[in-house]
Amino acid sequence: MNYSYDYPHPAVTTDIVIFTIRQDELKLLLIKRALPPFEGQWALPGGFVHIDESLEAGARRELEEETGVRDVYLEQLYTFGKPDRDPRERVITVAYYALIASDQIELRAASDAEGVSWFGMDELPALAFDHADILKMAHERLVAKLDYSTIALQFMPAAFTLSELQQVYELILREPIDKRNFRKKILSLKQLEETGEDKREGPHRPAKLYRVIDRSRIEFIK
Amino acid sequence: MNYSYDYPHPAVTTDIVIFTIRQDELKLLLIKRALPPFEGQWALPGGFVHIDESLEAGARRELEEETGVRDVYLEQLYTFGKPDRDPRERVITVAYYALIASDQIELRAASDAEGVSWFGMDELPALAFDHADILKMAHERLVAKLDYSTIALQFMPAAFTLSELQQVYELILREPIDKRNFRKKILSLKQLEETGEDKREGPHRPAKLYRVIDRSRIEFIK
DNA sequence: GCAAAAGTGTTCCAGATACACCCATGT
DNA sequence: ACATGGGTGTATCTGGAACACTTTTGC
């Protein structure tokens, strides 16, 4: 009991919804809680904000600890602070969401086995705390943002075909998209360039590979 | 020094950007700080979140203390938490913004005199802490949201003319709008109904008065 | 009767949608 | 040769933007 204040202070954490595309599915990372409360239940990765780090730095630290990944798309989502959301003490959590390209994930989380795992949106376990609310909001934001920004490019590996990109949109939006219209629109944004390479696999015409011209740029459209 | 923790805890505040329309201008409420740090400088209203109240409840409490207003549009904006944003201790602030109708403001803040005042966006004083950043984001959000939601209706009094509403849009967007297109669009949203009354003032045709059908409803458009 | 703001429709343009066939490859 | 996904163009529709005159009042 070393830190004392005149007024009660809440604890502040960051929790992160980490999305990626794996096995033709939108997935997110959950960790199994080793300690009470909610021992044994799945929860969003997260942890206390250090007293001398910014909120985003805290979120990136947690993100890297769990996935080994740096330099990914990370955006503040919302701050959740109902007084009773943690039974131990007052905890306010600043929620972030991150999008990770399929070729970026380090084995740390991928190999997991011990209490870290990727879940599809249709196979979610019960979540600890109010993490289901956080996840719901993150998912809604992702879906909404797909429509008016180029955020989906953050999911793509270094090189990919337009069909693969379209598949990502269809997976997340859960609706089919017209191929010709999709290509017209996505290419008109001038965010992609051909690598010059082809991807050949299977008994059909090879597909041109594309790369994102500037990964750090999220373009707003319409 | 009554409250002790094993780890250092930040303080958590809410700050509120309170917008209204007055004197044909978009204005926001600032308070003059009576105590250090930034003594004598203007700052956004706000204060510490009580340990047993939600973040939004804290924001509404501060809002009511400053303006005497309840039941206004209030939305969480962003959470600001750079380690050094307050020189005294680590303070994380959950910023909100509120829109107040011109006929809603109580005299408390309106009459003021002592350290509470409305400022137009073009006559802003230097702000304490990182409040200029908060204000900038709130203003950008407001402008953006004008475009794809009916948020502007929150500024309107119980009854108003379409010209008055258009003026509010023009004031905030700082650009003229075509009268016919504006009326077509705003009426097509079915959020307004005629009161049946006219507003007659000045030597010209009287204008129909309208009211918002459901004030609590913010419609998203497009 | 004149000055002032209220009120009202139509044309035009751009961007989104719908839609079907040929191409290059592996087996 | 055939099965498989890759790649391409045009017609139509829809919603936004541009635009000018008549109406009702107070003085």
Image (tube, coloured by chain):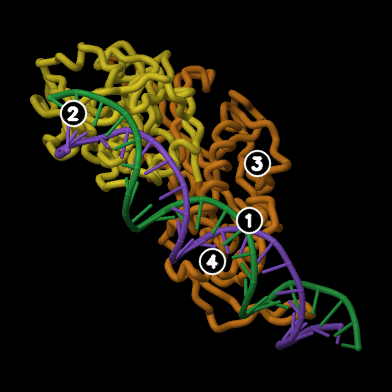
Chain colours: A orange, B yellow, C purple, D green
The residue at which mark 2 appears reads as: B23
Q: Is residue B214 left or right of residue B96?
A: right
Alpha-carbon span between mark 2 and mark 4: 45 Å
The residue at which mark 3 appears reads as: A115
Q: In this view, does A27 lie to the left or right of B215?
A: right
Q: Check if mark 2 and mark 1 are on a common chain.
A: no
Residue at the image position 58 percent from the left and 42 percent from the top: A139
Q: Is mark 4 on a helix, strand or loop?
A: helix
Alpha-carbon span between mark 2 and mark 1: 52 Å
Q: Which of marks 2 and 3 is in front?
A: 2
Residue at the image position 57 percent from the left and 26 percent from the top: A129
Q: Is mark 1 on a helix, strand or loop?
A: strand
Q: Nearer the viewer, mark 3 or mark 1?
A: 1
The residue at which mark 4 appears reads as: A186
Q: Nearer the viewer, mark 4 or mark 1?
A: 4
Residue B216, percent from left and from top: 47, 23
Pointer 2 chain: B
Disc 1: CA contacts within 10 A as few (<14), some (14-19) or many (>=20): many
Q: What residue type is labelled 4?
A: Ile
Q: What residue type is labelled 1?
A: Ile
Q: Nearer the viewer, mark 2 or mark 1?
A: 2
Pointer 1 chain: A
Q: What residue type is labelled 3?
A: Gly
